[in-house]
Amino acid sequence: MAQVTLQTTRFGPITVPPERIISMEKPVLGFESSKRFVIVEHSDMFPFVWFQSLDDPDLAFLMVNPALFYPEYTIEVNIKEVEDIEVDDHSSVETYSIVTVADDRSETTINLQGPIVVNVDTQKAKQLVLSQSNYSVREPLMKSGEKLTRVAPGDVSKDAAMKDTVRRVDIPEL
């Protein structure tokens, strides 16, 4: 498979090697025609990433690992729900939630009811719908009174105390 070059609305031209193309086995609800994506990282937006559609140059979702903002967040999934993304080992799965940035940054929300799970070994992904979840599609990104400040990617390790990390993150300008 050859590289894909796309003129995106948000990032301009991007070239994506085939091994970075993520195939959505169950597309994002409402965006069923977009089945190929790439995760675009920018150090000035860490820990947020963009989920850029390769099928629609105008479509890019802002995402983040939900555990950074909700350390207690877990998803219970029947193995049948992830068969199509070929999950053999849970350590090969990364979980993201779509973030909706409000004009008033304190009203920014995160979709915890519809996480996107990516098998990093197969580059297959899907959006789950957690119908038995107590979370909603518009949970506050930050708890009331919490302040966001800049953090550099090197300042955070995967083993860091997530709660302290969260308070040091900027909601990016769009």
Image: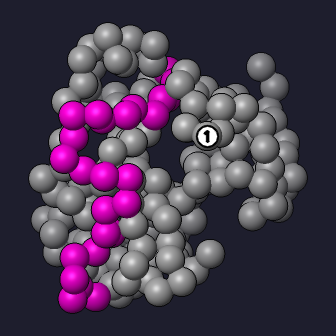
Residue highlighted by disc 1: 30
7 up-or-down from 131: above or below: below
Say which quadrant the N terminus sits in. top right
87 up-or-down from 64: above or below: above
139 up-or-down from 152: above or below: above
Query: Any magenta on residue 67?
Result: no
Asked whether 124 or 17 is in front, the reply is: 124
The answer to which image quadrant residue 163 occupies is bottom left
Examine the rendering and report whether any part of residue 158 can be seen.
no
* In this rendering, position of residue 42 left or right of residue 48: right
x and y percentages locating residue 136 in the rendered image: 31, 52
Tell me what residue is drawn at x 58 percent, y 54 percent: 61
Say which quadrant the C terminus sits in. bottom right
x and y percentages locating residue 100 in the rendered image: 49, 65
Tell me what residue is drawn at x 72 percent, y 32 percent: 33
**Badge 1 element:** loop
Instruction: Characterize the magenta stretch by its predominant secondary structure.
Output: loop
Residue span colored magenta = 122-147
x and y percentages locating residue 79 in the rendered image: 27, 14
Tell me what residue is drawn at x 46 percent, y 34 percent: 127
The answer to which image quadrant residue 117 occupies is top left
Asked whether 30 or 159 is in front, the reply is: 30
